[in-house]
Image (cartoon, coloured by chain):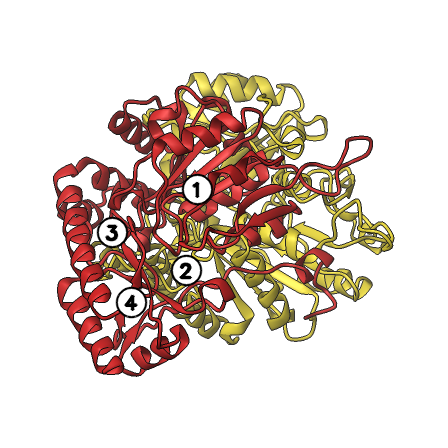
Chain colours: A red, B yellow
Amino acid sequence: MSKYWSKKLRGLSPYVPGEQPRDMKYIKLNTNENPYPPSPAVLERISSSGERLNLYPDFSAMKLRNTIADYYGLKPENIFAGNGSDEILAFCFRAFFDSSPAPEPTPEPEKIIFPEVTYSFYPSYAKLFDINYNTFDLNSDFTVNIQEFAKKNGGIVLANPNAPTGIALNVSEIKQILDMNPEKVVVIDEAYVDFGGESAIPLIDTYSNLVVIQTFSKSRSLASMRVGFAIGNAELIRGLEIVRDSFNSYTVNCISMNAAIEAINDKAYFETVRNRIIKTRERVKVAFTDMGFHVTNSKANFIFVGHPEKSGEELFLRLREKGILVRHFNKKEIANYLRITIGTDKDMDAVIAAVKYILY
Amino acid sequence: MSKYWSKKLRGLSPYVPGEQPRDMKYIKLNTNENPYPPSPAVLERISSSGERLNLYPDFSAMKLRNTIADYYGLKPENIFAGNGSDEILAFCFRAFFDSSPAPEPTPEPEKIIFPEVTYSFYPSYAKLFDINYNTFDLNSDFTVNIQEFAKKNGGIVLANPNAPTGIALNVSEIKQILDMNPEKVVVIDEAYVDFGGESAIPLIDTYSNLVVIQTFSKSRSLASMRVGFAIGNAELIRGLEIVRDSFNSYTVNCISMNAAIEAINDKAYFETVRNRIIKTRERVKVAFTDMGFHVTNSKANFIFVGHPEKSGEELFLRLREKGILVRHFNKKEIANYLRITIGTDKDMDAVIAAVKYILY
């Protein structure tokens, strides 16, 4: 702490990402990266980059937005591109949720709402922008009780599938949440949706209070390149643009934009990779169930597993000793669980063998 | 405007970047880009990128920070890397300046201070984070009166060389500003310093309240890749990291980091390019002086020129008609001036010929 830090900085609670060891000596299953490289078309486009690198990128990201719009049958004014979905989530908090204390004479805003167990970046954004929030407990089986969203609130953020449980709501449940909250913005964070969840994107035309956020980091193997996108009503997208232009006009660099365009265009590769990960996941779920774990019905590129006799922390540490990195959260509701990213089949065979060795 | 916009969003004043036409039919001298490509080593590194693009980049940016630290004889804990210097400036506003209204029972913070004519993004950041500010007028010759910084303030932001005038303070003047403000953070925005200004980086060891911000977008020809850096006391850098981790953990992608490393390492190329731009600038200054313009003593990669008989707006529009984009600001103090980026010698010959045609 320095005397030069602002009062605000002193009160921040930064997000803590999973470790990123650079020495590659671990089987790295702790940050939900895709184990497969991006489409060869992406690599080809990067290596043959004929862009004039000395010029600023197109801050409107129009080519990328057109590509995403075509893919989903929408218009570019429904699309916002950002430097990873984390940046877009931050912009959403600023654009759509009111801060406390409210300026006089306006009344204090209602608190926004999200589950207690979810992506742990949400409270960090809320603190950064002085947005008060309420959380609610998951059901004992880690599902989300959507009736919680019927309570008075100042807006909603919901990861679907949820993190780190992997459990997904279906679109009819998202629809119910939207119907309960016609005056509030509902942000659905679909970082993991491509691995078996149902996207809320088809609801965009009906609900002008819906923002759906997706990323190129997971299903499209581009975590290194930092690209995410939001889809919503043109007025909401315009709001995100104004926040961006108050912060950093050019947030997506030209090579990342080109990479993202190629990743969207190579549909066949995308299908192959995600289907392979889903297949591996389902096999690994069975293996963990057979070893006595409680295994959630994850629709993401990770499994979420807890053992009745071995603590999550112990398993995490023993796996680390054996050169396998997984994620353990020091949070009481889920302290006995591990989140394990779905790697290659070989990676997962190694995890299963290591866990067997530790257990028996 | 949408009913879903936050109160805060309704009050924002986003920065307006210069136009970025994609059709290349203009001689583009409106956004201070470098007319020369980056070092061949940068292009080679990008095209042979052997990175595992499916993995997140190193959020600590350690290789890039080590490279910059070595270059300046500093330590990596003195370096912060960001997604362009604009992002870092935004983080500085949040990290080092207090917001209004202050939480009770703390008194209202003093207002931060910057010149009325400067980089027009500063007021946008201030509005985004509820930071009150005062501005002061430049002297009639567009120089900055440093005694203005002796007034009570909540922190200082100063572009040096200043934008869009190009006029630079020397290090002894920056030292005076720091000596006047030992309890406040002084942010020196050195986006243009490599074209002839004096950097305040050597003062970092002496002044724990100094943050210097530079960019790869101008002198290192990497505007498209979005990389900037801050240099300061380790405690200030730590503050920037906490703000970043409350916003977006991984803001610099791996290919941009690699490109930046190569750009720093190719010192000879850097020297050649900046010297060429300086040489062109000095020649163009003489040509504009000869045409009757008032020409500031710009130390940046642009000139700032006003004609006693032709309005800035008219010149801007006439040049545009002739296929030459320059920047004109609708701000009364400088409405009669144009900011013209230094392009290639051929570009500048075209501007000089076009201006001659318009004037005579």
Mark 4 Cα within 10 Å, few/some/many (few <14, many 20+)? some
- Quadrant including the N terminus of chain B: top right
- Residue at x 69% of width, y 56% of height: A8
Mark 2 Cα within 10 Å, few/some/many (few <14, many 20+)? some
**Alpha carbons under labels 3 and 4: distance apart:** 29 Å
**Alpha carbons under labels 2 and 4: distance apart:** 62 Å
Q: Mark 4: which secondary structure? A: loop
Q: Mark 2: which secondary structure? A: helix
Quick check: marks 2 and 3 in contact, CB under 8 Å?
no
Which subunit holds the residue at mark 1? B
First in residue order: circle 2 vs circle 1: 1
First in residue order: circle 3 vs circle 4: 3
Residues tagged by mark 2 and mark 3 found on one chain of the structure: no
**Alpha carbons under labels 2 and 3: distance apart:** 38 Å
Q: Which residue is mark 3?
A: A221
Which subunit holds the residue at mark 2? B
Q: Which residue is mark 2?
A: B271
- Residue at x 43% of width, y 57% of height: B250
Which subunit holds the residue at mark 4? A
Q: Which residue is mark 4?
A: A293
Which subunit holds the residue at mark 3? A
Q: Which residue is mark 1?
A: B33
Mark 3 or mark 1, whichever is nearer to me: 3
